[in-house]
Image (cartoon, rainbow, N blue to C red):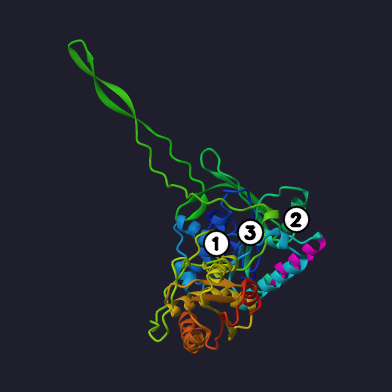
Amino acid sequence: MLFPKIATGFDIIDNLWQGFYKGRTYLLTGPVNSGKTTFCLQFALTGLRTRGKVVFFTDERAEDLLLRAEALQFELAKPLENNELLIFNLNQKSSSLTNELLSKTINEINQIVEQERPERLIFDSFAPLLQFEDIAILKEKITELIYAWEEFKVTTIITLGEPVNALAQQIFDFLTSIVTATLKLTQPLADNSRVLSLQARLGHYPLTHTDSYQIRIGIGLSRFEPTPQPEITPQPTLVEKGESAEIAIKPEVAEPSKTIETAVIPTEKEAITEIIPKEPPPQPEKSISPTIETDRIPPIVIEEAIPEYPIRDLDRDDFTGFFNFDGLLQIVNGVLEKKHPFSIMLVTITGGVESRAKRLLLSQNLAKAVKQVINKPVPVGRYSDKIIVLLHKVTKSEMQTMVPEIREKIVKTMLAESPNLPGIDIQVIAYAYPDDIRNSNDIETIIRTG
């Protein structure tokens, strides 16, 4: 076949169009609670069932995306463990947006796609990449991006909410002019059905089609099947009439047939002006098989005042699930006030992985490996592709003794986690108070640039 197609998992599309064209880009749009994220997960799972690699960019935390999948009974744990599904986060505060930052983000996305060569690429939502200050630059960059994906033969879904102003409508019209087809979803009607509108720009026949769909547990989006109406079943009853009794028909309503409950999907973030790129999101933990001996690592003291995990979401890193920059500073400042000796250990992948985007992806595994090797209740966090560990009441001399062994074990654990990275190398740098650290400004400098 000159232009092969791949299944989407959505019966209306697969029956009508025989799926999506391989290596083409499709726009999925609709309001909140229309099923956009559900279809993205459904499309991903359909590819994973045939061992196709999927790269999924989301504007929410990975754990929230996985909760959506769990509510739908979509099994994603094994694909995540096998690196068949890679999840990245696109979400930054709008105040940090510049054309330069967006161009850099697009370049990193292209690096990931070029390196991973997924079969399916999903952006839920695509809005973070549409915040260019000049719409002419936006059109140029997005056109180049979509054409690059198509050269890699990657089948792509990009999602957007409904346009909310004239500029958003202009961007929406531009996107519909360069994608292969547009799928529009709606919110549920009174009978729990939703309306699907298909508009193909080229290739697919028919070019336009409208149908009704529903969301079903374990399936996702599928053709709407009305609930059967209750049937009136006559039942004979005895009706007294004088001294005799005769049979009369008394109507009784039969019990309605059971229907499949629809999934309760968390609210999707749709506003184009609210969503911006950030670093990749969190993925579920998986066990690492080898047992790491920690007997030779000196005991580490940690007081109850320093929690092992963040108490507030503000203090949680969106990708690894450990502390973020603010959370780390909050803890370190508390220790500085007590003037207790402590050490900061920075762990970074320095060899075997050239792409920063790939290092960012592996920082989740690196954070878990560090935590397993230390095997103590210590605060662990992440900044960019660096992993930071706070070792309370550990002096610099003790730290220097620990570092070589810790480094060796982290490498061993990472290789067990990612055997396809035989050349991986880890750098471990230790800083101590009061030797190298005097105040919180020193901590900020170490975390950002150390």
Pointer 1 local density, CA inside 10 Å: few below 14, some 14–19, many at least 20 = many
Mark 2 lies on a secondary structure that is: helix
Mark 3 lies on a secondary structure that is: loop
Q: Is residue 407 left or right of residue 325?
A: left
Q: Nearer the viewer, mark 3 or mark 1?
A: 3
Quadrant (top left, top right, bottom left, bottom right) of the N terminus: bottom right
Residue visible at 42% across and 74% down? 287
Question: Which amino acid type is marked by label 3?
Answer: Ser
Residue 237 drawn at (x, y percent): 25, 23
Callouts 2 and 3 close, C-beta under 8 Å: no
The residues colored magenta run 136-148
The residue pinned by badge 1 equals 43
The circle on residue 125 is 3
Q: Nearer the viewer, mark 2 or mark 1?
A: 2
Frontmost residue, 336 versus 183: 336
Q: Is residue 100 left or right of residue 267?
A: right
